[in-house]
Amino acid sequence: MRANLTRLLLGIGLIVAFSQSAMGQSSSDKDYHRARWDKLHFKPAISQATNAQCLACHQEILKRKPLEQSPAGVKASEAKAWYETLDTYTGPQETFHRRHLVTDYAKSVMDLKCTTCHEGNDPRDETSGTSATTQAGLTMRKMVDPYVCALCHGQYNAKKMGVPGPWLEKSAMFGDSCLTCHAGIKTERHKGVSFLKAKAIEAAGKKDSDVCYGCHGGRAWYRIPFPYADKHWPGWGDPPAGLAKKYPKKPAQQAKQ
Ligand code: HEC
Ligand code: HEC
Ligand code: HEC
Ligand code: HEC
Ligand code: HEC
């Protein structure tokens, strides 16, 4: 039995090794520094990279599990953070990456790629402008431009919508549904955004407003709402890859606002 298993594993190993070298992108023959400075980490190559290419070296991103218990003895299975109390939150504690890429809910409403968030950063400087060869447009000390997070983790803009207070306090006035108004207002919302599953979002949002609220205030890490549609914040660089088509260039007059 064990011998068979060993042979099987050896076989799989050989197939993997063969297919990697056949594809000309063997990740295992690179030493640490060559891998760290692989051109795939940087623009322009990173803009074309697939998840599979990144995962060839970074399997840990999808494999890692949170601790079952904190050093002080709190069990992960019994702990919930405030942002894990929406109806859409299900299953055991998972890592940040898994919650955006592979958990059931993530897969049902989103189609995020590694490169939606990772657009390349300079591992030595983590900022722009320190030398002639530095990458332009880096967000200081960040591997990921938080612009992309703010898209789904900004505040709920009650004032702009004419909702007379925080959504969780006033939602009953609107039948607990965003669609009471949004069946007719801004209906083109998610179409054409490469990392969202527009149809699935609408279907799920009809049944439960926590779906909509979840990306529009229910897990807000920022004090301000995201200025959607055509507004870009001054100095926040180019739109993330998934939105580049929709917003080809930052309008100059808005950048000055
Ligand atoms: C050839 C192997 C290889 C490939 C392919 C690869 N990486 Fe890496 N990556 C590394 C190594 C090695 C490090 C350094 C890890 C460390 O220091 O702990 C690293 C570090 C990183 C970091 C941390 C950056 C920092 O400043 O510390 C990020 C983020 C990252 N990779 C994302 C990606 C993404 C996204 C892709 C696909 C576009 C990718 N990697 C493809 C090997 C690779
Ligand atoms: C939702 C946005 C998002 C997506 C999608 C995403 N990442 Fe990340 N990733 C982050 C953030 C944020 C960090 C932490 C950055 C920091 O510490 O400055 C990070 C950190 C990392 C790191 C370094 C630290 C670590 O945890 O080891 C690696 C490597 C990495 N990501 C690889 C990937 C790969 C490979 C994919 C695709 C399979 C991916 N990421 C998809 C946002 C994302
Ligand atoms: C396309 C929308 C989208 C983007 C972009 C996005 N998130 Fe999220 N994020 C979500 C959704 C949806 C969930 C809830 C997942 C769940 O409940 O299963 C979530 C959950 C989280 C959580 C909680 C994870 C947990 O275990 O409870 C953190 C932390 C988080 N996001 C941080 C970030 C950061 C930081 C970024 C930017 C690097 C980011 N998100 C980008 C949609 C997004
Ligand atoms: C009382 C009616 C009403 C309800 C209920 C409502 N909205 Fe709105 N919403 C609006 C109006 C009107 C606008 C357009 C405001 C403008 O452009 O000035 C809007 C705009 C938005 C925007 C764009 C904001 C921006 O800055 O451009 C988002 C996102 C949004 N709504 C999400 C939601 C979500 C999610 C819910 C449910 C949690 C919800 N809305 C419930 C009326 C409503
Ligand atoms: C997985 C995260 C996610 C979910 C779930 C989600 N949205 Fe969005 N929504 C976004 C992102 C990202 C954008 C920005 C898209 C763009 O700029 O094209 C957006 C844009 C919008 C806009 C347009 C803003 C503007 O001014 O153009 C409205 C309105 C809106 N969402 C309402 C809703 C409603 C209603 C629901 C539930 C049916 C919902 N959203 C569910 C992420 C989400």
Image (spheres, helix red, strand yellow):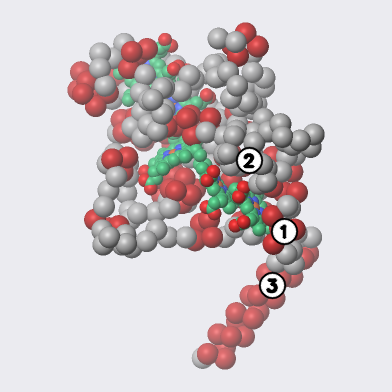
On whether ligand 1 comes within 8 Å of the CB at mark 3, the answer is: no
The location of residue 27, given as percent across then percent down, is: 71, 62
The residue located at (52%, 33%) in the rendering is 146
The amino acid pointed to by label 1 is His
The location of residue 52, given as percent across then percent down, is: 63, 54
Q: CA distance from mark 3 to mark 2?
A: 38 Å
Q: In the drawing, what numbered circle is on residue 63? A: none
Q: Quadrant of the C terminus?
A: top right
Figure check: 212 above or below 124: above
The residue located at (69%, 40%) in the rendering is 47
Classify the position of ligand 4 by quadrant: top left, top right, bottom left or bottom right.
top left
Q: Mark 1 or mark 3, which is nearer to you?
A: 1
The residue identified by callout 2 is: 126
Residue 136 visible here: no
Q: CA distance from mark 2 to mark 1?
A: 17 Å
Seen in the image, is 22 located left or right of residue 252? right
The residue located at (72%, 58%) in the rendering is 33
Q: In the drawing, what numbered circle is on residue 33? A: 1
Q: Quadrant of residue 168?
A: top left
Specify which label sits upstream in the sequence, 1 or 3. Answer: 3
Between residue 104 and residue 65, name the one nearer to us.
Answer: 65
